[in-house]
Amino acid sequence: MPVRVRFAPSPTGSLHLGNALTAVANRAFADARGGVLVLRIDDTDPRRVVEGGEEAILADLRWLGIAWEEGPVRQSERSTVYEEALARALEHGATRDDDGAVRLGRTTIARPDGTATYQLASVVDDLDLGITHVIRGSDHRPNLAVQQEIARALGGELPEVIHHGLLLGADGKKLSKRHGHTAVAELRADGIPSAAVRAYLKELGLPTHDVQLDASRLRRFAIDAIAAMSDEELAAAAAAPVSLAPALRGARDLVEARSFAEQILDPAPSALDAAAHPTLERFAELRAGFADPLTEADARSIVRELKAVGGDLRALRLALTGHHRGPELWTVVAALPAPEAERRIVVAGRG
Ligand code: GLU
């Protein structure tokens, strides 16, 4: 039987990393078996529907590179399927309360207004969409017996269910705002490459126990992901010309890469005091000895020679970029055409 899994987020907004782990795990499970991933949006509970929430999830999945073959299947569009199922459940042991709600055993499967609860809708969909394996967080473990009971009342059998351990904050508590940036959209805004988030979640796989979010491991993957990018990819990610790629290489994330590009393209003007003047003059002389464009070897040798004669490299950096910290100095020297380098030296020398 071909494998069919589903990822079923509630549309509450950008996925937190714990949900993204479930998505990655489902995709990996399907890929390993030539299977299909169905994207289902659990939007029957009005308290868990946020305006723009579905769009945010789709954007997260696309950014993460997690494709789905079917869907999004929205539960809000399937009320007739649930009504039919409810009728069947009522014939097989479900009972209606005085207020109109329907229960099977202790579980409410329809609200007084007749709409299906998550428990009913989820089981109906898992059966109806031919899901072969449910892979989800262990916070849903208490739903297993309930959902198996509902499936049987509907004349079916719940697919095999695999519960994975949850991703918790470093303090061992459920991921929440308190833990800082743990939503996919936030990591993206922080300049963590999608490949890094994916690699981190892939490494976790299907944890049997809860695991604590390891921010430094994620940061490590960000550095690896930047190293693995081509010059073109890195420049595009930093919205910089590809000629600046060498300067962006030292960045630990894409926000930093963008700030490195800005230092070169649009520096904050800085005027240095007289102590820096000999360094600036010496640099100008050295730079004048090379035609544009500078090769890496030329740029490195200018910096090396300046250092050898006791030049103040920190002053040069400040003069060229307006910042104390930034890309490797030779990459800045290499990126600036002679007239622009000279202009910055003149401005800085006016201090
Ligand atoms: N909408 C549920 C959630 O986001 C899905 C649960 C399930 O996978 O059955 O937790």
Image (cartoon, helix red, strand yellow):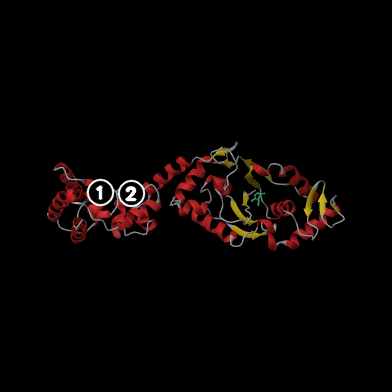
Name the front one of labels 1 and 2: 1
114 lies above or below 177: below
Q: What number is the disc on residue 112?
A: none
310 lies above or below 123: above
Q: Position of residue 135 (x, y in %)?
A: 63, 45
* Near-viewer residue (268 or 29): 268
Residue extending farthest to the right is 98
Instruction: Count neighbours of disc 2 (C-alpha within 10 A) and say few if under 14, some if 14 to 19, many if 20 or more.
Output: many
Is the Cβ of the residue at disc 1 closer than 8 Å to that at disc 2?
Answer: no
For this view, does 320 lie left or right of residue 218?
A: left
Q: Position of residue 92 (x, y in %)?
A: 85, 51
Secondary structure category for the residue under label 1: helix
For this view, does 217 lie left or right of residue 317?
A: right
Residue extending farthest to the top is 209
CA separation in Å, label 1 and label 2: 12 Å
Instruction: Count neighbours of disc 1 (C-alpha within 10 A) and say few if under 14, some if 14 to 19, many if 20 or more.
Output: many
For this view, does 165 lie left or right of residue 323?
A: right
Say which label, 1 or 2, has the lower sequence index. Answer: 2
For badge 2, the amino acid type reads Arg
For badge 1, the amino acid type reads Leu
Ligand 1 contact, mark 2 (Cβ < 8 Å) = no
* Near-viewer residue (223 or 6): 223
Q: Quadrant of the C terminus?
A: bottom left
Q: Position of residue 268 (x, y in %)?
A: 30, 58
Q: Position of residue 306 (x, y in %)?
A: 16, 46
**Residue that appears at 54% across and 45% down:** 179
Q: Which residue is mark 2?
A: 249
Secondary structure category for the residue under label 2: loop
Q: What number is the disc on residue 329?
A: 1
